Amino acid sequence: MTAKQKRSLGPAPLLYPEPALLIATYDSNGKPNAMTAAWAGICVSDPVSLMVAVQPPRHTHDALIARKAFTVCVPSEKLVAETDFAGMASGKKYDKFATCGFTAVKAEHVDAPCIAECPVILECLLTHHQRIGTHTGKLSKSICKI
């Protein structure tokens, strides 16, 4: 491809593929909640840490800041519809665990729920958060792999 064949797409979130992850927390009433996040990934290897971008208006945002703990639940292909719903519906209006048929299991190492139907779960402690534009980046230390 030559320089003439390339064109600028401008500033846009263009890294693909992005994983669809379920971020699970307890809300201020202690009720399990989950949101879908695609803007997440490993950012440091020692200590093993990941970053998740969450907009402040999201129901999960305040729970992450208050509890300083969450789980990253990696859904299987069987959970496509549920993962989509968790990204479209607000935990302020819906009990996503009930609607999606998720089974909440208390995490072993952090104050957050696990989604039992997910084959891979990372238990995370919030270590830093930084507002960057429209999102707050949450840097967490992964302390347990299931």
Image (cartoon, rainbow, N blue to C red):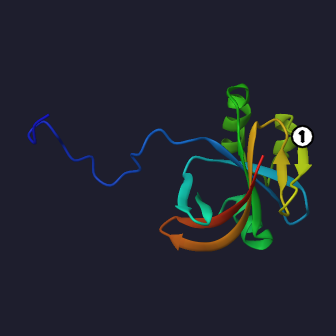
As helix, strand or loop, the secondary structure at mark 1 comes to loop
Side of 29 where 79 appears, left or right: left
Report the residue marked by disc 1.
103
Category of crowding for the residue at label 1, using alpha-carbon neighbours closer than 10 angstroms: few (below 14), some (14–19), many (at least 20) = some
Q: Residue furthest top?
A: 78
Side of 45 where 64 appears, left or right: right
Q: Nearer the viewer, residue 127 or 9?
A: 127
The spot of residue 60 in percent (x, y) is: 73, 59
Q: Residue furthest front?
A: 46
Picture quadrant of residue 15: top left
Q: Quadrant where the N terminus lies?
A: top left
The spot of residue 3 in percent (x, y) is: 10, 42
Res 50 visible? yes
Q: Residue at x 69, y 64 (%)?
A: 61
Res 55 visible? no
The spot of residue 77 in percent (x, y) is: 67, 27
Q: Amino acid at mark 1?
A: Thr
Q: Is residue 22 above or below residue 53?
A: above
Q: Is residue 144 above or below residue 137?
A: above
The spot of residue 133 in percent (x, y) is: 47, 68
Q: Residue at x 66, y 36 (%)?
A: 84
Picture quadrant of residue 126: bottom right
Q: Nearer the viewer, residue 67 or 141?
A: 141
